[in-house]
Image: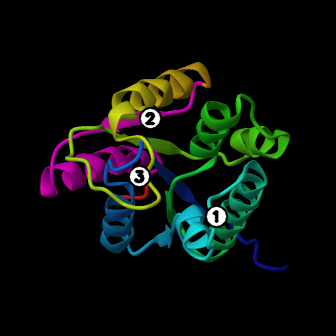
């Protein structure tokens, strides 16, 4: 009789929210803290490599790149922290172009995160060539919160600066780990 392999317990956490709310920093810190995967924001690397402004067709490429990075991390780790995800893509598409690509909508429901950490706008704005809407951060935050609620995705708002923000995120992840008896 062969040994029955138990399926790997996987925790997936999305760090999401408007521009300049500390998503990348928080994702890296959580991945380090838990010795998990850090799935970086594909859009940043992709857009940095392009000499011209992005177009609508670039968003599908970005969405596919983000999902591929997530799928790879899922197969190699027990806990995955993803810097942005398909809700970011959906909101980006809808705000910029009035509708969303079907691939993004399909992937939004398939990405299956155990928890979304919605970063609050209580951090100061940091300018960056890829950021577009410093005056609309609260508008986008409210849109994210509304969509997460409407989709019935589990989320926690993460506020605070520096270590306070990180500790709030760790506390939220611990609730998931405890509920799965992963201590």
Q: Which residues are magenta?
A: 152-181
Q: Quadrant of residue 101?
A: top right
Q: Residues within 10 Å of mark 1 (few under 14, many from 20)?
A: many
How far apart are labels 1 and 3 at the CA level?
20 Å
Label 2 vs 1, first from the N-terminus: 1
Of badges 1 and 3, nearer the viewer stands 1
How far apart are labels 3 and 2 at the CA level?
15 Å
SS class, disc 3 = helix
SS class, disc 1 = helix
Please say whether residue 172 is one of the residues in the magenta stretch. Answer: yes
Please say whether residue 61 is one of the residues in the magenta stretch. Answer: no
Label 1 vs 3, first from the N-terminus: 1
How far apart are labels 2 and 1 at the CA level?
19 Å
SS class, disc 2 = strand
Q: Quadrant of residue 141?
A: top left
Q: Which residue is mark 3?
A: 177
State the mark number for residue 155: 2
Task: Indicate the position of residue 55 as horizontal and vertical percent values.
Answer: 71, 53
């Amino acid at each position: 009789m062969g040994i029955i392999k138990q399926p790997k317990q996987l925790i997936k956490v999305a760090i999401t929210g408007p521009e300049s709310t500390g998503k990348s920093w928080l994702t890296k810190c959580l991945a380090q803290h838990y010795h998990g995967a850090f799935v970086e924001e594909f859009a940043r690397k992709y857009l940095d490599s392009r000499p011209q402004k992005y177009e609508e067709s670039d968003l599908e490429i970005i969405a596919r790149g983000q999902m591929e990075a997530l799928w790879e991390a899922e197969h190699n780790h027990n806990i995955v922290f993803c810097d942005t995800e398909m809700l970011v893509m959906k909101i980006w598409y809808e705000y910029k172009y009035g509708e969303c690509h079907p691939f993004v909508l399909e992937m939004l429901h398939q990405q299956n995160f155990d928890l979304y950490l919605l970063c609050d706008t209580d951090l100061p704005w940091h300018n960056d060539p890829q950021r577009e809407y410093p005056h609309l951060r609260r508008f986008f935050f409210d849109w994210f919160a509304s969509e997460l609620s409407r989709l019935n995705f589990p989320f926690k708002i993460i506020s605070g600066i520096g270590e306070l923000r990180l500790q709030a995120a760790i506390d939220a992840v611990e609730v998931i780990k405890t509920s799965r008896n992963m201590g």
